[in-house]
Image (cartoon, helix red, strand yellow):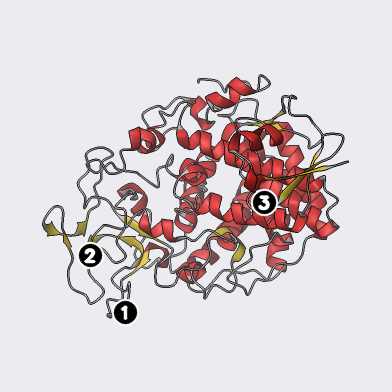
Amino acid sequence: MSKTISFKALSLGTAFAILASCTDLKVVEKDSLVVQSASGEAKVADVAGALQTGYNDLGNQFSDQASTYSLGQHTTAEMIPPTRGVDWGDNGVWRTLDQHTWDATHSGVRDSWNSLNSQVFKMTQILASSPTAAQAAEAKFLRAWFMFYVMDYWGQVPFRESKEGVNDNPKVKSRSEAFDFIVKDLTEALPALSEAKPSSAENSVATKASANYLLAKLYLNKAVYKSAKPEGPYTFAKADMDNVVQAVDAITAAGFKLAPNYFDNFTSKANSEIILTGAQGSPQNRWYMTLHYDQNPSGWNGFTTLADFYDTFQDGDIRKGIPAKKDGTTFSGIGKGFLIGQQYDDKGKPLNDSRANKPLQFTRDVILSGCPTDKGIRVIKYHPADANKYILARYGDAYLMKAEALFRGGDVAGALAQVNALRKIRGASALAALDEKAMFDEIGRETYWEGGKRTVEVRYSKYTTGTGVDNKNAYTVLFPIPADATASNPNLKQNEGY
């Protein structure tokens, strides 16, 4: 006899006791039922509903300005979270990310760990619940996606089989084991996944293209994940780089290509680069987190980029930005790309900083603590006037993964041609030569503020040397396992240095 349990009627503590995930996960099921069989195995009664919840959580998880996004972006030299008076103080959670001085009690580290691991377990439940071949493929993709970030950020992955009881401590996969597991999930999923629609501005369901995108990212970073030391040195095997090229070529063959207008990618006009979007989760946090209080829309006056990064762009490169229209339409006072200098309202009237009582002029200089309200270059990729779904995987990123794979595989001429073809479309002049620094900079110019810079900096051994980093110790290439997690599961061992 089976027992059906509705999580709508349960307290968080009861829900946790039933799911008994790998740590102190705060799992809240919203629209699906979990069925506990006579053997104690947890299954879902509504596979389609549980899958949709997974897709919804995928968008919500990554579109937020905190949690997983903040770990992948605030810790890099592309973004700084200045404290302005009491704004963005938050007991130092933002500053410690910038400085690399986090510890095992950091709320962002804990929340991301809990959320990602709970999603991995949910997909495992789906796979134990007699899904169709197509549903199983989607669940394997989603499990691979969530597990990738656990592996990438923490270097070890707790894993609970659906048949394991609540008193069983989840076993822990090493980084190398997790890599192999994720590749297996994706390889098995690929044949049953549907084809993506390159002409669509929204692809919110797992497809062959999204699986190939994640496979390309895995193989590009395989040297990191298989390294005896998390901080390296890393040795990039040509066979792995060939796998990257093969995966990206499959995406290209499916019809994806670089968009003629870079910023169209982040609007409903997108029609050639969008590999995966969230099903839910508006990108509005991306403009609220950076815009000033006196702009329209009124922002939270938070995060900015750094002048050193801004200076890697040349004039004429469309990725540097498009001036505000200022034509009287709503939100037309906001430009796209980097906002620097005097800011204007929708009708073109210069704005004042109401708190400082002076013209609102965004400056190149910015400091982490005690920062004036006007300091720092703001960044807009999703514009409030025409933003579409939040993007999780984009062809421009995949395209440069192939270029880097060619470069690391020894085909420097092919990599240079690949990079220059992209630069021509983006309005930048051709590079005369390509070295590791030039490759790193080009990835930054193409994918800035999209959430993946930490992984790139680690791969290039730049993560502990960036602007603002106080703790330059090599161990910070991995985050600490949250204190609650190590306390609840003795199979987890705290990462070195914490």
Q: 251 and 104: which one is in front?
A: 104
Q: SS of the residue at dot 2?
A: loop
Residue type beneath disc 1 = Thr
Q: Give yes or no for contact between labels 2 and 3 (Cβ–Cβ under 8 Å).
A: no
Q: Mark 1 or 3, which is nearer the eye?
A: 1
Residue 221 visible to an observer of this rendering: no
**Horizontal and vertical percent for residue 137?**
79, 54
Q: For residue 214, which numbered disc appears in the image?
A: 3
Local secondary structure at mark 3: helix
Lower sequence index among marks 1 and 2: 1
Q: CA distance from mark 1 to mark 2?
A: 16 Å
Look at 31% across and 71% down and name the residue there.
323
Q: Is residue 188 visible?
A: yes
Residue 267 lies left or right of residue 232; in this view the side is left
Give the mark nearest the N terminus, 2 or 3.
3
Query: In the rendering, at what x and y percent does residue 170 appear?
Result: 72, 28
- Among numbered discs 1 and 3, the one appearing first in the sequence: 3
Q: Amino acid at mark 3?
A: Leu
Name the residue: 28% across, 41% down.
Answer: 83
> Which callout, 1 or 2, points to the residue nearer the camera?
1
User: What is the x, y in percent for residue 192?
Assistant: 82, 59
Residue 133 sits above or below residue 123 on the image: below
Place of residue 477 in the rendered image (x, y in percent of width and height, measured from the top left): 52, 31
Neighbor class of circle 1 (other Cα within 10 Å; few <14, some 14-19, many 20+) is few
Instruction: Read off the residue under disc 2.
Output: 343
**Which amino acid type is shown beneath numbered disc 2?**
Gln
Q: Which residue matches tag 1? A: 329
Kindly report the distance in space between the C-alpha atoms of the residues bearing marks 2 and 3.
39 Å
Specify few, some or many for label 3: CA neighbours under 10 Å numbering under 14, 14-19, or 20 or more: many
Q: CA distance from mark 1 to mark 3?
A: 39 Å
